[in-house]
Amino acid sequence: MDCIFCAIAAGGIASETVYEDADIKAFKDASPSAPVHILVIPKAHIESIAHLKANHSDIIVQLIYRAKQIAADKGLRGYKLVFNVGREGGQVIDHLHLHLLGGWGNKENPDKFRV
């Protein structure tokens, strides 16, 4: 499989990791859309929200809960959690990932990073 996020999850491609456990990896986005832009991914390959099965419910809970904890660790009082689904929904990488976006209150021009 030729998936960049699978390679990052396996450690084959370097990333600026902010969290990792047996099932989840979180790392800074290489092209941030916010002052804080972290991607939270399952290590197992799931293409998108559209490809979820009933047995994936635990991983979705883990992604969201981990994003909440990372936001707290980063001192974010407000933030966005975004799943893009399919090309028409803005998904560029065909591996399920949650965008944690925040930190606008820490910039001189907070509107610059609104998405």
Image: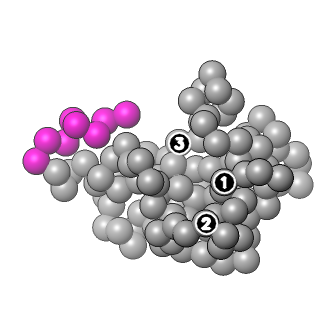
* The furthest residue to the left: 108
Label 1 vs 2, first from the N-terminus: 1
Q: Which mark is drawn over residue 82?
A: 3
- Crowding around mark 1 (Cα neighbors within 10 Å: few <14, some 14 to 19, many 20+) is some
The first of marks 1 and 3 along the sequence is: 1
Q: How far apart, in angstroms, are the residues tagged by discs 1 and 2?
A: 8 Å
Which segment is the magenta one?
Answer: 108-115
In this figure, which residue is indicated by the disc labeled 1?
4
Proximity of marks 2 and 3: CB atoms separated by less than 8 Å: no
Position of the C terminus, as image quadrant, is top left
Residue 112 among those drawn in magenta:
yes
Q: Nearer the viewer, residue 41 or 67?
A: 41
In which quadrant of the rendered view does residue 57 lie? bottom right
Image coords of residue 51 (percent x, y): 82, 39
Image location of residue 70, percent across then percent down: 46, 67
Q: Identify the amino acid type marked 2.
A: Ile
Q: Amino acid at mark 1?
A: Ile
Residue 97 falls left or right of residue 79: right
Q: Rounded to the nearest whole Å, what is the CA distance between mark 1 and mark 3? A: 19 Å
Residue in the picture at 58% in, 59% down: 40
- Label 1 secondary element: helix
Q: How is the image coloured?
A: one colour
| Residue 44 placement (x, y as % from top left) | 79, 61
- Contact (CB < 8 A) between labels 1 and 2? yes
Q: Secondary structure at mark 2?
A: loop
